[in-house]
Amino acid sequence: MVTEITDQTFDEATKQGVTLTDFWATWCGPCRIQSPVIDQLAEERQDVEFFKMDVDQNKETPRMLGIMAIPTLIIKKDGKIVDRLTGYTPKERLNDLLDEYTAD
């Protein structure tokens, strides 16, 4: 399951374990293509928590993270950003990346 988060809940939600946050907007075409990929991974992987944040509703976190284009995917491990992907990312690539951070 992918959980919707906000500026207020981002830090707390992503402070433990491996998390992937999809920064998106309803009007964004590539975001609509990325979203089903994130949904599939969320169903398949129990070792990662998946979140999404609407950048139109939540402006503070994307600004603090320097997000200039969407979709942007932020992968955090124990509260620290370990990877950042901008634009559409295929499922296989995301799965491989997540494997790197959940391996230990």
Image (cartoon, rainbow, N blue to C red):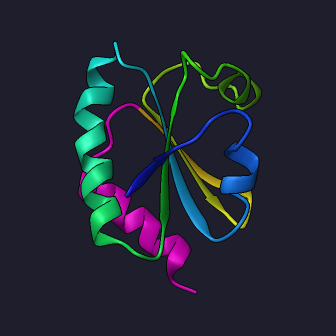
Going 75% across and 48% down the picture, which residue do you hit? Answer: 11
| Residue 10 quadrant | top right
State the residue lying farthest toward the bottom: 104
| Residue 19 quadrant | bottom right
Is residue 97 located in the magenta-colored stretch of the structure? yes
Residue 26 location (% of width, % of height):
36, 19
Is residue 54 located in the magenta-colored stretch of the structure? no
Residue 75 in the image: above or below residue 6? below
Residue 70 location (% of width, % of height):
45, 24
Going 46% across and 76% down the picture, which residue do you hit? Answer: 47
Going 54% across and 72% down the picture, which residue do you hit? Answer: 101
Count of numbered badges drawn on the protein: 0
Nearer to me, 88 or 27: 27
Q: On the rendered structure, is 36 left or right of 101? A: left
Residue 31 location (% of width, % of height):
33, 28
Nearer to me, 69 or 55: 55
Question: Quadrant of the image for the N terminus?
Answer: bottom left
- Which is the main secondary structure of the residues drawn in magenta? helix
Residue 49 location (% of width, % of height):
50, 63
Going 66% across and 56% down the picture, which residue do you hit? Answer: 14
Question: Quadrant of the image for the C terminus?
Answer: bottom right
Q: On the rendered structure, is 21 left or right of 37? A: right
| Residue 41 quadrant | bottom left
Residue 5 in the image: above or below residue 91? above
The magenta span reads 87-104
